[in-house]
Amino acid sequence: MIEIKNVSPKAPLVWFILRLMLLIVLIIPLPFLLIGIGEAVGDNLSARIVFSIILVILIIPQAIYTFVFPSLQYKKYQILIEGNKVTVKRGVIFLKTEVATFARIQHISTYRGILDRFFQMTNVFLITAGSNVRLTRLSLEQGQEVLSFVEEILLKNKNIEEAKND
């Protein structure tokens, strides 16, 4: 049995960087929008105020998502590999549980993006007939441990099936 209560300690930083890039992409056009709306509505102060409020309402949740959620997400992320299944629990507002039984796993793959390579992390995907279970932002050691454990169990199950068929 493997229980991973926390993924790589660098995961919140990667989540923060990814979300910050999205926030920047959302903020860059704001001055141009404000200038454009200002020219369109002229001296209509109430229209400018309403538009500014709408922009703030759109940006503040993204800012909270960028600055607060990575640490909460890190605390809530849990992986449990036991018996005949892999269970992943994640989420901050909406909690999600993904379960894959070893009997249904058809393929295992890993993925390391640019930030993953820079921060020495990996992502493991367990592909089943009905869904994919993602084990994201694992340290390289955790990823290798998970891969070895799952491959060992799958090989054992395959040998048992072959023995039954003989």
Image (tube, rainbow, N blue to C red):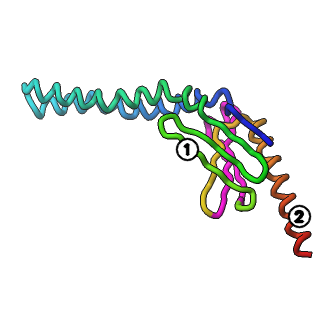
Q: Which numbered disc covers residue 96?
A: 1
Q: Position of residue 31 (x, y in %)?
A: 27, 27
Horizontal and vertical percent position of residue 86: 71, 49
Mark 1: which secondary structure? Answer: strand
Task: Read off the residue under disc 2.
Answer: 159
In terms of sequence position, does the residue under pointer 2 or pointer 1 come before the other? 1
Q: Residue at x 88, y 64 (%)?
A: 160
Q: Quadrant of residue 30?
A: top left
- Check the image and name the residue furthest to the left: 43
In this rendering, is residue 50 above or below 97?
above
Whether the magenta-drawn stretch holds residue 108 is answered as yes
The residue lying furthest to the front in this view is 83
Q: Find numbered disc 2 in the image and state the secondary structure of the residue it sits on.
A: helix
Task: Give the Cα distance between marks 2 and 1.
Answer: 33 Å
Q: Please tell me the numbered disc located at residue 70.
A: none
Give the amino acid type for the residue marked by disc 1 in the picture.
Answer: Lys
Classified by dominant secondary structure, the portion drawn in magenta counts as: strand
Residue at (15, 27) in percent of width and height: 48
Question: The disc labelled 2 sits on which kind of residue?
Answer: Asn
Mark 1 crowd level (few <14, some 14–19, many ≥20, 10 Å Cα): few
| Lateral position of residue 37 relative to residue 56, left or right | left
Left or right: 66 as drawn, with respect to 114? left
The residue that appears at 70% across and 52% down in the rendered structure is 109
Residue at (59, 28) in percent of width and height: 12
Q: How many residues crowd around disc 2 within 10 Å: few (fewer than 14), some, or many (20 or more)?
A: few
In this rendered view, identify the residue nearer to me: 88 or 50: 88
* Residue 117 image position (x, y, % from top left): 67, 36
Locate residue 20, reporting x and y percent: 47, 29
Residue 77: quarter of image:
top right
Mark nearest the camera among 2 and 1 is 1
What residue range appears in magenta?
105-129
